[in-house]
Amino acid sequence: MATVFSQYAWLVPAFPLAAFAILTALGRSLSRTGAWIATVASLASFVYSVMIAAERLAKNAEDYIGGFAWLRAGSVNLTAGYEVTNLTALMLVVVTLVALLVNLYSLGYMKDDERISTFFSYVALFTASMLGLVLADNLMILYVCWELVGVCSFLLIGFWYRKPEARAAAKKAFIVTRIGDLGLLIAILLLFWYMPGHALDFASLHNVFYAQSGIISTSITTLIALLIFLGAVGKSGQFPLHVWLPDAMEGPTPISALIHAATMVAAGVFLVVRTFDIFAAAPAALDTVAVVGAFTAIFAATIGLAQNDIKRILAYSTVSQLGYMMLAVGAGSTTSAMFHLFTHAFFKALLFLGAGSVIHAVHTQDIREMGGLGSRMKITAWTFGIGALALSGIPPFSGFWSKDAVLTAALDDNPWLFAVGVVAAFLTALYMARLFFLVFAGKPRGDAGAHARAKESPAVMTAPLIVLAALAVVAGFVQTPFSGWLGSWLTGGAEEEHASGLAIVASVAASLLGLYLGWLIYSKGAVRRDAVSSRFPRLVRLAERKYYIDELYDALFVKSLRGLGKALSAFDDVVVDGAVRLAGRSALALGRLNTRLQNGQIQTYGLAALVAAVVLVLAIAGRRFW
Amino acid sequence: MEALQTLTWSDTRYLAPELALAVAAVLLALLDLILPRRASRDLIGWGALVGLLAAGVFVGWHIYDLQSAVDAGKEPIRNLLGGSYRVDDFGNLLKLVFLGATALIVLASLGTVKKAEVPIKGEFYYLLLPAVIGAMVMASSGDLITLFVGMELLSITSYVLVGVRKRSGASGEAAFKYVVTGGTASAFILYGMSFLYGVTGSTRLSDISGALGDALADYRALVYVAFFFMIVGFALKLALAPFHAWAPDVYQGAPTPATSFLAIVAKGAAFAMLYRIFIFLYRAFGSEGDQAAVREDLFLALAVLAAAAMIVGVAGALKQQNAKRLLALSGVANAGILLVPLTLEVNSLHSSMFSEFVYYLIAYVFMNAGAFAVLTAVSRSSGHEELSAFAGMYHRAPWTAAAMTALLCSLAGLPVTGGFFGKLFILFGAVQTKAYWLAAILLATTVASYYVYFSFIRQMYMRSGESDQAVAVPVPTGIVIWLCAAASVALGILPKPILDWIDGIFSLGADFLAR
Amino acid sequence: MLGSYLTLAAVLFCIGLYGVLVKRNAIIVLLSIELMLNAVNLNLIAFSKYGVVPSLTGQVFSLFTMTVAAAEAAVGIAVLIALYRNRATVNVDEYDELRR
Amino acid sequence: MLENVPVLSLIVWIPLLGALVTLLLPKHHSRLLRGFALLFTVIPLLLAVWLYASYEPVAGGGAFAEHGTWLSVPLNTEAGLQGTGVNVTSYRLVFDYRLGVDGLSLPLVLLTGVVAAMSVLASVHIRKRWKTYFSLFLLLETGMYGVFLARDLTLFFIFFELTLIPMFFLIGIWGYFGREKAANRFLLYNGLGSAIMLLAFLILIATLGFTVTETAGGAAISFGGDYETLLANLADPNAAAHASGAMFLSENLKWAAFVLLLIAFGIKLPIFPLHTWMLKVHAEAPPSVVMIHSGILLKMGVYGLVRFAAFLFPAQLASWATVIAILGVVNILYGAVLACVQKEFKLVLAYSSVSHMGIVLLGIASLNETGFEGAIYQAVSHGLISALMFLIVGSLYERTGTTKIDELGGLAKVVPFTAGILLTAGLASLGLPGLSGFVGEFLSLLGLFGSLKWLTAIGALGVLLAAVYVLRSVLAITYGPLPERFAGMKDARFVEALPMVVLTALIVLLGIYPSLLTDLMQHGFDGLLKELQTRVGG
C-alpha cells in the first residue's frame, strides 16, 4: 500500500513548530489567541498522526525514510531525516494525543496567567521536538531533539520563574539529565567511529547489530549500549539519576502530565527500544537495564509511599513505572515495554491532570490538607479513580494488561526480576490507595474555607480527563495475553499469545492486596497510620527523605565542585596570575635596582662601571679558559 | 711615512662641509659680540641653521661626486692626509644624519628656549656647530688620532653645552658629571688605543687591520687589553648599561636642546667611531682558529653590552616619573638596539648591518628629536619635566598629542612607523645570523618598553591635566614635531627609498674593508 | 725596557682611576683624569721608542693628547667654578642633586 | 559587476577610510558619528556577504587573491653571497601586499563584519569622546579584517599589531574603574604574544621565505613572507639543496618555530595558563569593546594557530596532537570549573571563553577535516554568542549599574525580551543542539574522538559543566525574585534590540542549518590534510 501520508510525516512536528515560531515572534501581545493557535496546531498534528497510523494499520506497510542534507563536514555527512515505522506511528499518536489534551486542559488551567502565550509556545516547541525525536531516522537528529525536549522541560519547569524552588528545580532537571545526555553523546561518537561508513541511521545500526556480524566487538558494543542507556537513565529518571523528576513537579501541572509523565520521560524507554539491536548484541548491557529498571521500580515506589505532596507521589510513581518499562526492555521484551509506555501515557496523564484539577480547586498540594473532595468534584474523583485502578493494575483497566505483559516478560527472563516486579506492583497499589483515599474520601482536613470553595473544574479541563479515562480503560486491549496484535504490529512478527497464569495471578493478587491494605489504613482506619512509622521511625524517615540521595549528591558533587572551584580560583589568582605579576614585579625590581644605583654620586656610577667592566672582561675572556 | 703628508689646497674641497661649519661658527660668534645685548639671539639660531644647511649641501655634493666616481669605475674614496681623513659614503651618510638632526634641534629650540633657561642663547647656537664638526670628523676619520681629536672636539663643546645655564646648579652639576665621565671614557679609549698602536706600530686604521693578525700571535693579551679598554670607554660614551648611570643625571640637568643633541648626535658619532674601529676586525682576523675566536670574543662582549643596555634601559624606565630621565633611559635601550647590527656576524647571507644601523639611526633621530621637541613645549607650559606634565594633553593640545602618539609608537616599535621597520630589519639580520638570543632580548625589551612609552599615552589620554589651559606650541617647534611625526610614519610605510639609497651608495667592502 | 714603562703607565692609570673614583675633592678628581691621560702619553712614547714597530706617530699622538687634555681641563675647571658659585662646595659627594 | 574590483582590499581599507572621515566630523554629534561608523562597518559587511555568496569552495582556494609588491628592500651582498659561488644579481627582502580568502578565513571575515556592525550599534552605551572612539574602532576593524585576509607574514603581523593599539585606547579610555591596569595588561601580554610570533615569523622568512630566480646573469634571491612561497618551499624537497642549505629550516628550528607560534597564538586564544590577561579585559573594558574582543580578537588566535602553526608544521602538529588535546581539555575543564564559582557575570563569561576555546584546541588536535571545521565553527559560533552576551551585559549594566550575579535577579519580570535573549544565548553557550554552539562542539569532539578517545570523553565533561555555570549565572540573573530597586526598569530600546535579534537569529540559523558554514569550509583544509596524510603517513 502506498504510504501517502508517511511521506509528509515531517508535517507532524511542523505544525507545532510553526505555532512556536508565530507565538515567539508575536510575543505576549497574543495572549489567549496564542493559546488557541497552539491548540489548533496540536490538533492538526494529532489528526495527521492518526491518518498516518491508520495508513500503517494495513499489513506490511513499508517503512518510509526521507530527509535532507543537514551537516557535511569532513567525513561527517548527516541528514535531517525522518523515518516512519509502526513504532514511530504509535508514538506519534500517543504524543500528539496527549499534547492535544494537555493543550486543551491548559486553556482552562492557565487562563489567568499573564504569560499564557509563552507557556503555549514552550509547549508547542516541546511537542515539535518530541515528535522530531520520535520521527528521527538517525541518532544524531534524535540527539538534537532529545536535547531540545530537555530544554523545553527545563523552561517549563522553571515557568514560574519567580519562585526560587522552580528555578532550582529547572536547573537541576537540566543538569542531571545532561549527565545522561553526555553518555548518549559519547555513545554517538563511538558509533560514528566504529560504524562502517560513519553511519548513524537506525537502518544501518540494525544491519550491523541485528546480524551480530562482529564488525564491532562485544566489549565496544556493551560500552555503547551502556552509554546509550545512561542517556535513557537521565531522561527517564532511573536510579541514580532520578532525583530531578520529583523536583520537576514545580512546573505547571499540565506540564507534569505531558512531559514528566506521558512523553518526554518515556523517551528514554523509546530510545532503548529504538536501539534495541545494540542492546541485544550486548547481553551484559541488557542485564544492566533490567536490574536498574527493577531496582528503580521498587525503590521509587517505597519513596512514593512516604510522600505527602500529591504531585510528588505521582512523580515517584512515574519513576517507578518507567523502571517497569526498563525492566521489560531489559528482559528482552520491547513490545511489553512499548505497551506499558502506551497505556502509562494515558493513565498517568490522566492522574496528573486530575491532580491538577484538585490543586486548581484547593490551591494546595499537600494531601494531608485535603480529604473528602470526592463529593465536591465528582468527575475528577471518578476519572482519578479510574486512573488509579489502571495504574494499580486491576483488570480490566489498561494498566493491568501492560503490567501483566511486563511481568510475564520478567518471569521469562529471571524469577528475581519477576518477584521485584510483583512487590513493586503491591507497593504501587498501596500508595495509590493512600493517595486516593486521603484526597477524595473521608472528611476535609486543612483550611476549611478553601475546601468549601472547592468546586469542579470547568469543562475544558474535565473533558480531557474523561477522554483519558476512557482510554485508560480500553487502551489495554490492543495487546492481551490472548491476542498479541500490538506486538506483531510493532515488530512485524506473528501474533503471539503470551499468557502466563502465574503472572496474572500474582500481579492481580498483589494489586488487590495493596488496595485493600490502603483502604484499611487510610479509609477505614482499621490499621493505625503510624503503625509503621512508630515502630520503624528511621526507616520511614529514610523513605520520606528519599534515602538522602539529594543530600548525598549535594555533598558529593555540588559541594566538591564548589570546593574545587574555590581552590582553582585561588590557584588561578595566586599561582597563574601570580606568575604573571611576578614577571612584572621582577622587571620592576630590576628597574628599582637601577634606581638605587642612581644616587646622584658620580663616583658610585664609576665604581659600578668598573665592577661591570671587570666582570665583563672576566666573563668574556675567561670563558676561553674554562 | 705617509702619515705626515700635509694638507693641500685641493684637499680643502673634501673638507668643505666641516670648513663651512667652522666658518659659520666663527662668524656667528662675531655676530654675537656685535649684536646689541637686548637683540633677539634667534638670528644666530637662523644663522646656525643656514650653516648646517650649507654643510649639508656640501655633503650632498660629496655623495654625488663619489657616486660618479663609482660610475666611472674609480675608487669611491677620497683619502686625505695620507688616509687619516676619509671621505667615503659611510662618513657622508652619517654626516647628513648629524647635520639633519642638529638642524631639527636648532629649529625646535628656536622660540621655545626661554631666556631663563639658556641666558646666553647665542653661545648655545654657535657652540653646536663645532660639536657637529667633531661628530663629522669622527665619522670621517681613518686614523686613531683623527678619531680622538674629533671625539674630543665633540666632547668638550658638549660639556659646555650641558653647562650653558651657568646660573643653574643642576646644569653645572650635570656638566661636571659629564666632564668626569667623558674624561674618564676618553682616557680609557686612549689607553686602549695606545696599546693598539703599540702592537701594530701605526695609528692608521687600515694599517692596524693589516698588522693586527700577526700581532695577535705575539701579543694576544695586549690585543685583548687594547680592545677591552676601548670597549669600556665606548660603553661609557654611549651609556651602555651598566655604564649608563651618568646619562639620566646629565640629560636631566642639561637644557632640553642640549639633551637632545647628546642623545642623538653625540651618540651617533660614538657609533660611527665604533664602526670604524670594529668593522676592521673582519679584515684583520680570519674566519678560523684563534683569530676568529678573538673576534668572536670581542663581538660577544659588544653583544652582551647591547643586551644589557636594552634590558637595563627599559627596566629602569618602567617606573621613571621624570620625562627627561625616562627619555635618557630610553636612549640607553636604543643605544643597545643600535649596537645590535654591529655585533651580528657578517656571513654568506648577512652583510647588511650598516643598512640596519643607519636606518634605525635615522628613525631614532626623528623619534627622539620629535619627542624632545614635544617635551620642550610641554615643560615650557607646565614649568616642570615630570610625566604628569603630559596629563590631559588630549584636551589641551590634541594635535600635538596625536603627533606624540605617532612618535611614541615609533619609539615603541609599533607598526607602521620607522621604529618598527628599523627594529624589523635589525631583527631579521639577527635571525639570519642565528643570533636568536639577541633577537629574543630585543623583542622582550621592546614589549616591556610598551609600558614605558605608553605611560606618556596614559597621561595624555587617560588622565586629566593640572589645568585645562591649551599648551602653546611655537611655530618652529610645531614644525619640528610634525616633521618628525610625519617622517616617523613615512619611514614606516615607505622605507624603501631610503634603504635603496643607502644600499646604492654604501658598500661595506669599499668603505670599510678596502684599504 | 718596554715592560717597565708599560707597568709604570698602568700604575699611573690605576692611580688616576682610583683618584677619580674615590677622591672627594672635585679638583683632585679632575687632576686624576689628567693622570690617566698622562699614563696614555707614557704608553704612547714608550711604544714609539721601544715598540714592535717604532715610529714617530706615537709621539705625535701624545702631542695631540696633551693639547686636548689641556683644553679638557680648562673646560672642566670652568664648569667647576660655575658649579662652585651655585653650590659653594667642591665636595663631589655633595653634587647629588640630580638623582633617581 | 564586482569581478574587477579589489573586494578584499576594499573590505580591509574602507574602515580605515571611515576612521579618517570620522576624524573630520564634528565631535559632539554622537548620532551622526555613530551613523557614519555604522555605514563604514556595514559596507565591508555587505562586501563580505557578497564574497560569501560568490565564493566557490573549490580545491586550491578561491579567485579573490590580490597581490602586489609593497616594498622590496635591498640587502647588502658585499661580503656575502659572492663567496659562495653563486653569482647574485639581486638580493632583497620583499614585503608583499597579499590578500586572499579561503574556506578558513571567510567564515571569520563574515564574523568580523557582523560583530563589528553589531558592536557599533551597541556603542550607544559609550558616553564620551565619541569621535575618538569611533575612529579607533574603525582602525581596529581594519586590523581585524587585515589579519584574516593577509597572506603575507609581515602584513599579517602588521595587522595583528594594528589591533593592539586601538584596543589599548578603547579599554583604557572607555573602560570601567580598573581600565588602565587592564589596558596595560592587555598591551603587554599581547605585545609579548606578537613579539614571539614575530620571532617565529622572522625565522620562517629567513629560512623558508626565499625565492631564487635564475636569470642569465646569475640568481636573484629574495626573502619574503609570502604564505604560498613558504608552503611551496616546505613541500619542495629540493628547496634545501637549491638554496645552499644555509638558508633552510632545520628540524630543530621547525620545532622551535612551531612552539613559538603555539605560545604566541596561545596567548591570544588564550590557552591555560596564559589566560589571565583576558579576565581583566573582559571585566574592565566597555561591553561594546568586549564584544569585539571576545567575539573576534580571540578568534585571531584560533585563525593564526590553524593558518600558521598547523598548516606550516603538520608533522609537528601531528606529533604534538596529544599535547594540544591535553591543553584543550585542561582549558575546557579549568575554565568551566572556575566559571562555576565566579561572582561577577563578566568573569563567568571570561572563563567560559577559556573553556570554549579549549574545544577549538580539541578540534585542531584531531588532525582531521571534521575536527578542523569544528574548530573554526566553534570559533565563529563562540564569536557570535559572546558578542551577544556582552551586548546584553552592556544593556543590563546600563540599567542596573552592576553585573554581580548576587545583586541581580528576577529580571525576566521587568526586561522579558532581554532576559529571553540572554537565556537563548546561555543555551547556545552551553551547547544546546539547534543553536550554533552545539555544532562546533560536536564536530570538534567528533573529530578528536577518532584518535584520542579518553581525552575526548574527559573533554566532553565540559559540556556538563557548561550547563552548570551557564544556568547558575543566567538563571540567577533572570529568574527568582526581583529586587525592588529594579522594579521600574525598561526593556531594551530598538537600537539595542536590533543587534540582539540579528545575533540571535544568526545563532539559531547556524544551529539549525550548519551546512551554511561547513559547506563554505570544504577544501579549506585540503593542503593541510594532504600534508598530514603524506608526511605523517595517515
Image (cartoon, coloured by chain):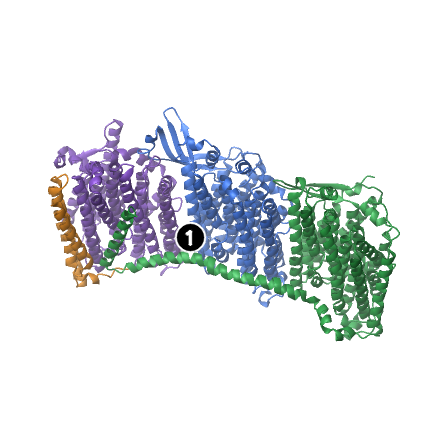
Q: Secondary structure at mark 1?
A: helix
Vertical side of D281 occupied by B138: above or below: above
Is residue D402 among what the camera can see? no
Vertical side of D218 occupied by B99: above or below: below
Indicate left or right for D175 with A68 as reference: left
Q: Which chain is green?
A: A
Which residue shows up at 35% across the image and 54% down it? B315
Quadrant assignment, res A59:
top right
The shade of chain D is: blue
Residue at the extreme front:
A626
Q: Which residue is mark 1?
A: D188
Query: Residue D149: x, y in percent?
Result: 49, 40
Q: Which chain is purple?
A: B
Q: Quadrant of the N terminus of chain D?
A: top right
Query: Residue D378: x, y in percent?
Result: 57, 47
Query: Residue A210: x, y in percent?
Result: 75, 44
| Amino acid tagged 1 | Leu
Q: How many marks?
A: 1
Which residue shows up at 43% across the image and 41% down it? D253
Q: Which chain is orange?
A: C
- Which residue is nearer to you in this view: B116 or A134? A134
- Which residue is nearer to you in this view: B297 or C60? B297
Identify the subunit bearing mark 1. Answer: D
- Which residue is nearer to you in this view: D5 or A293? A293
